[in-house]
Amino acid sequence: MLTDTQIVWRLFLAAALGGIIGFEREKHSKRVAGFRTHILVSMGSSLIMLISMYIFEIYAGKAPVDPARIAAGVVTGIGFLGAGTIIRSGESVKGLTTAASLWTVSGIGLAIGCGFYIAGWATAIIALVTLYLLKKIPIEDKQE
């Protein structure tokens, strides 16, 4: 069983990592899902993972419980949340990167929630590099 301190640390860390990515989105005027939204998605995912692990622990040997089932529901649910950030206007589509960042912070939250810290940290760092630094690389638009 996790201690109260471990539980609070995991929730805080998930919120912090999601917030860093959300701050980057907000800084670049992607306000459909910015700082607070990313914090809530990552921390909420962490909480759901903690609940999954808690349920698994309390029912171990008493009933068949799969902690991955609830986590799979998070991935599906965040897909719907992300879809709400995507806007199509004519041939242009906006919000795909924000939707992807929401989906990623939900994964970060799940990782932190189950104690897979290295994956959570590494994903947050790679996501920030992708969102911030790779945006500066000019890519030619190849339209036919």
Image (cartoon, rainbow, N blue to C red):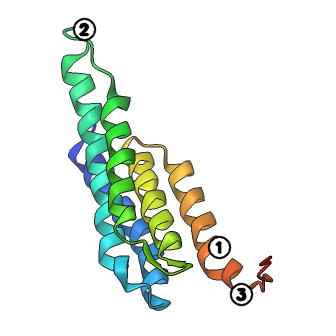
Q: Quadrant of residue 60?
A: top left
- Disc 3 versus disc 1: distance between alpha carbons? 11 Å
What residue is pinned by disc 2? 61
Q: For residue 129, which numbered disc appears in the image?
A: 1
Residue 9, position as x, y percentages in the image:
32, 56
Q: SS of the residue at dot 2?
A: loop
Tag 3 residue: 136
Residue appearing at x 45%, y 47% in the figure:
111
Q: Nearer the viewer, mark 3 or mark 2?
A: 3
Assess disc 3: are there few (<14), some (14-19) or many (≥20) residues with their C-alpha within 10 Å of its C-alpha.
few
How far is the residue under mark 1 from the one under mark 2?
43 Å
Residue at image position (40%, 55%) is: 106
Residue 98: give x, y in percent of width and height. Answer: 47, 72
Sequence order check, earlier mark of 3 and 2: 2
Which element is circle 3 on? helix
Q: Quadrant of the C terminus?
A: bottom right
Residue type at tag 1 = Val
| Real-space CA distance between mark 3 and mark 2, rounded to the nearest whole angstrom | 53 Å
- What amino acid is labelled 2 in the image? Gly
Q: Earlier in the sequence, mark 3 or mark 1?
A: 1
Marks 3 and 1 close (CB-CB < 8 Å): no
Q: Earlier in the sequence, mark 1 or mark 2?
A: 2
Task: Pinpoint residue 46: horizontal percent, then vertical percent.
Answer: 33, 50
Disc number lying in front (3 or 1): 3
